[in-house]
């Protein structure tokens, strides 16, 4: 027999209970800004946690982090609890903080191979031709046994296929170096946005998102998303990757008495904006089939029209806060939202949707047979945990006690495509014979040889001139010195002759 226990959402004419046995049939939390969607998410997340169901949720504004601290009910919350005949007991849920940038939580990483070419093409905003080249890069890496772990690996394999484009084009189809260059530029843009920290190891293990504490409560995994929302493509692609990983890795369990994991996807419209047909088909497939893996997915958005009909039709549990309609397009969306509920004869759904106050909602949840109940106007119950964000110190204290502390905080870089391809290039360059000189190099060598010959000729001419000058100088000296020496010799001879003959100079 199916378990009939569930999460108490709120009440009006009767309590509204989201059955745990039907929670894997997915759901929708919708409503205009300021109508109470975050509080509804907090109430549901803590209820699942209390039941031993792990939760993963993105924290867009930082407010959801308060679920980790006991509440401090104010007069307004106490009045709401009294109105609903509730005893509001402050309580906190066990929480693990995560952050793709590693600042407000443990880093989350995925490898390039795990992400795959389809999601990477969306992240890089590639067209069909560029996506085709990216698929070739993955195929070549797989064939050559090259691990693609981080952006350096992806950059290396793209350069590899560009350098070997002619040979690869005969096997895989056209590989244009120009297209590769475009993808590399997109990679640089992605890296400048800080996404490089997301790719690498140690990669996230899904079992670390599906933990319970010693008391049996499920951990609420909170993804810090205030900075991440500055790059909405990365935000939506990451969450889609995570859903896909859960779908691929978890075994079939059918309809369990309670989910194995509940996944809250805030700002859900970002997932579907500018999504290709192939990507939309992937999303629809994951949403349709992942419930049999025991995973419930809850989309949170301002208007149900943000979600395609093929996906919206699979969301059985719905909490619809107030909608505002000022334009014809918004009025059309409002009517579509009203028509998606089973009508309640007690009121006009269209009118109530516009009249709901903060903390009120139209609620339609699945019954034991999996049939959506007639919608009812409901007060959302106040949470037992804190309304508002944690302090930096409270976050640091929780991270220090985290069950995954030290597991993901330090990145690892093992040998992969980048190291292998770099080593190949270095070896090829070392083994290759020196290339023949180019025409420019030949011309330069010839000019250098001619310059050397000219220099030798000039030196020889200078030496010959020096020798000639020296000889001329000697000749000049001789022409003057010889007569003098000759005259001196004659005089000296006379003096000697007089001495020998006994003659002396006249005095």
Image (spheres, rainbow, N blue to C red):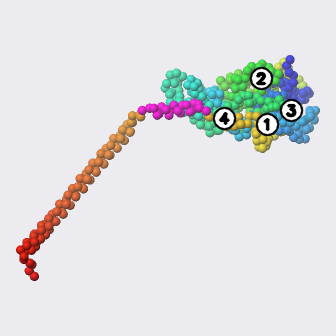
Q: In which quarter of the image is residue 442?
A: top left
**In this figure, which residue is indicated by the disc labeled 3?**
380
Relative image position of residue 43 (x, y in whole percent):
84, 32
Q: What element carries label 1?
A: helix
Asked if the magenta segment contains residue 432, the reply would be yes
**Mark toward the start of the polypeptide (1 vs 3):** 1
Mark 2 and mark 3: span between their CA atoms? 26 Å
**Mark toward the start of the polypeptide (4 vs 2):** 4
**In this figure, which residue is indicated by the disc labeled 4?**
198
**In this figure, which residue is indicated by the disc labeled 2?**
294
Q: Is mark 3 on a helix, strand or loop?
A: strand
| Front tag of 4 and 3 | 4
Give the crowd class for mark 1: few <14, some 14-19, many >=20 residues within 10 Å: many
Magenta-colored segment: predominant secondary structure: helix
Residue segment shown in magenta: 414-433
Mark 4 and mark 2: span between their CA atoms? 27 Å
**Mark toward the start of the polypeptide (1 vs 2):** 1
| Front tag of 2 and 3 | 2
């Amino acid at each position: 027999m199916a378990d009939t226990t569930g999460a108490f959402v709120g009440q009006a004419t009767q309590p509204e209970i989201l059955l745990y046995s039907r929670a894997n049939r997915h759901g929708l939390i919708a409503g205009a800004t300021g109508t109470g969607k975050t509080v509804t998410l907090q109430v549901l997340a803590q209820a699942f946690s209390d039941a031993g169901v792990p939760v993963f949720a993105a924290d867009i504004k930082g407010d959801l982090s308060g679920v980790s601290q006991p509440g401090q009910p104010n007069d307004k919350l106490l009045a709401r609890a009294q109105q609903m005949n509730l005893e509001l007991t402050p309580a906190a849920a066990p929480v693990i903080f995560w952050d793709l940038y590693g600042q407000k939580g443990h880093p989350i990483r995925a490898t390039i191979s795990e992400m795959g070419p389809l999601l990477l093409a969306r992240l890089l905003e590639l067209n069909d031709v560029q996506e085709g080249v990216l698929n070739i890069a993955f195929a070549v890496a797989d064939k050559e046994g090259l691990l693609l772990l981080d952006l350096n690996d992806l950059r290396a394999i793209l350069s590899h296929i560009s350098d070997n484009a002619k040979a690869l084009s005969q096997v895989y189809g056209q590989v244009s170096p120009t297209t590769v260059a475009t993808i590399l530029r997109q990679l640089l843009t992605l890296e400048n946005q800080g996404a490089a920290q997301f790719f690498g190891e140690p990669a996230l293990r899904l079992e670390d998102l599906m933990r319970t504490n010693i008391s049996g409560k499920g951990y609420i995994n909170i993804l810090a998303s205030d900075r991440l929302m500055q790059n909405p493509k990365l935000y939506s692609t990451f969450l889609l990757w995570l859903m896909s990983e859960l779908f691929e890795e978890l075994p079939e369990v059918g309809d369990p008495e309670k989910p194995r994991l509940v996944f809250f996807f805030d700002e859900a419209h970002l997932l579907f904006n500018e999504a290709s047909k192939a990507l939309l088909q992937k999303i629809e497939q994951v949403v349709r089939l992942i419930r049999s893996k025991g995973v419930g997915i809850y989309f949170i958005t301002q208007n149900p029209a943000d979600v395609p009909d093929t996906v919206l039709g699979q969301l059985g549990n719905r909490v619809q806060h107030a909608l505002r309609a000022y334009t014809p397009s918004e009025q059309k969306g409002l009517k579509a939202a009203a028509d998606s509920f089973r009508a309640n004869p007690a009121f006009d759904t269209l009118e109530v949707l516009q009249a709901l106050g903060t903390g009120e909602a139209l609620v339609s949840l699945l019954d034991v047979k999996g049939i959506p109940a007639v919608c009812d106007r409901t007060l959302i119950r106040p949470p037992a945990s804190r309304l508002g964000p944690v302090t930096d110190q409270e976050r640091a204290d929780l991270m220090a006690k985290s069950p995954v502390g030290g597991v993901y905080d330090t990145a690892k870089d093992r040998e992969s495509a980048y190291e292998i391809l770099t080593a190949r290039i270095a070896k090829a360059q070392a083994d290759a014979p020196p290339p023949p000189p180019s025409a420019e190099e030949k011309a330069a060598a010839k000019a250098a040889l001619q310059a050397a010959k000219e220099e030798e000729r000039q030196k020889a001419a200078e030496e010959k001139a020096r020798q000639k000058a020296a000889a001329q100088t000697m000749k000049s000296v001789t022409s003057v010195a010889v007569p003098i020496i000759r005259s001196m010799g004659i005089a000296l001879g006379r003096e000697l002759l007089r001495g020998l003959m006994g003659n002396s100079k006249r005095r």
